[in-house]
Amino acid sequence: KLLIPLDVGRSDGDLSGTSFEALMLLSRVYEDLCVRFLELHETEQAAVSPAQLQALITKAIKCFETVLKNLPASEQVARHAGTMSRAAQIVESVLRLKVMGLGDSEYSVLVDAVEELLLHAASASETTSSLQRAISQTRGV
């Protein structure tokens, strides 16, 4: 079951600070487990079935979505220039997890769509070399 620690004494339903941090930690643990299981699955050493991995990915995404919904406003902006906000880090984790759950054919369609978007967005503003670098980076993801 998905555990979401809530502060029992609060009536408004918001996550308390401690519960929020515990849920954030649980989300990170689920994400790390998914990454490790996927690595083991690719080397055929995993004792986890694809269905179990998909269920774990779903739990991790639900945890991150709950964290994102209850994220304090102060955490939604980057603290330093050039760094990602906590909200952006959570979104990045959710996207990473969703890509983990894609099949090979779905992944290829996603990469092709991203490349097409890059081509359309860059046609007016970027040079060909920077566009090629961006496309190679999407293949690296």
Image (cartoon, rainbow, N blue to C red):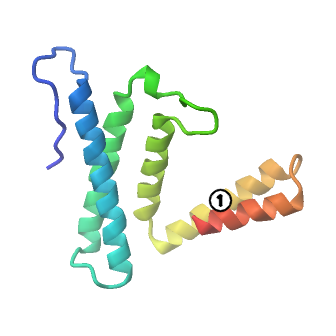
The residue under the point 44% across, 65% down is 102
Residue 103 picture quarter: bottom left
Query: Which residue is at the far bottom?
Result: 44
**Image check: 129 left or right of 88?**
right
The residue under the point 46% across, 36% down is 86
Query: Which residue is at the far left?
Result: 8
Q: Is residue 116 above or below residue 80?
A: below
Residue 50 coordinates in the image, percent (x, y): 29, 72
Residue 5 coordinates in the image, percent (x, y): 16, 35
Secondary element under disc 1, as helix, strand or loop, is helix
Tell me the quarter of the image containing the C terminus.
bottom right
> How busy is the neighbourhood of tag 1: few (under 14 within 10 Å), some, or many (20 plus)?
few
Residue hosting label 1: 113
Looking at numbered disc 1 in the image, what kind of residue is underneath it? Ala
The residue under the point 28% across, 53% down is 29
The residue under the point 47% across, 60% down is 99
